[in-house]
Amino acid sequence: MQQYQFEKIFSQMANEFGKIQKGKEDMYSLLLFTIESNLLKVHRENPASNSRRLQEAIALALFRLKERYTGETFSTESFRNPDNGRLEYAMLMATDPFTNQELADAMTKAGADLEDRAFLRQYYRNPILCLLRIKDSVDFWMKQYGSDGYFHFLEGQTGELVTDNKLNFTFQL
């Protein structure tokens, strides 16, 4: 996969699922907070997992989610490194039942069929919308504060609420 193809995932997913409109984030606040708090925990432990690495990690996570609901395979390993891999993992722990067994168990107990690709596509819609929203925010805050801009913003907004190091998850029935 070429760099151009790697970065194209953002527009492809936006075309397929749309984007969260400005001012409509409240509907997604619990999921956004869960993802962002996981990201902040990782960044605090590993400052090299910064906003630049987060841009890459979001693309990696989007490819992973697309693999889950389409069955396709994407060759993204050449783009993964320890710094963006930690951030990718934090996002997937918040949203992906194939990464987070506790989430899979809760979803299965609630009656979800994790083998049904149509169900998975619908389930991943909100996480994908949130990842695209976070990507836009990362781009904005990096212009303001550089390679640590997004995490500078997160610390100011929610930093005091993020007190433990456990990676959390959330899902909607």
Image (cartoon, rainbow, N blue to C red):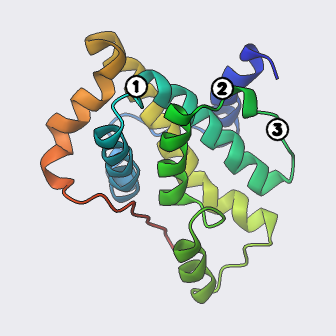
Q: Residue at x 50, y 43 (%)?
A: 86
The kind of residue on which mark 3 rests is Phe
Q: CA distance from mark 1 to mark 3?
A: 23 Å
Disc 1 crowd, CA 10 A, few/some/many (<14, 14-19, 20+): many
Residue at (47% x, 31% y) in the render:
54
Q: Amino acid at mark 2?
A: Ser
Q: Which residue is mark 1?
A: 51
Please tell me which of labels 1 and 3 falls first in the chain. 1
Vertical comparison of 162 with 78: above or below: below
In terms of secondary structure, where does tag 3 sit?
Answer: loop
Residue, x 32% and y 27% (percent of image)? 150
Residue 71 vertical placement versus 146 (above, below): below
Where disc 2 sits, the SS reads helix
Q: Earlier in the sequence, mark 2 or mark 1?
A: 2
The percent coordinates of residue 102 (x first, y second) are: 52, 76
Mark 1 is on which residue type?
Ser
Answer with left or right where residue 50 lies relative to residue 171: left
Q: Secondary structure at mark 1?
A: helix
Give the label on residue 74, or none: 3
Q: Is residue 69 toward the left or the right of residue 26 in the image?
A: right
Q: Quadrant of residue 147?
A: top left
Q: CA distance from mark 3 to mark 2?
A: 16 Å
Q: Residue at x 32, y 12 (%)?
A: 146
Q: Pick whichever of labels 3 and 2 is earlier in the sequence.
A: 2
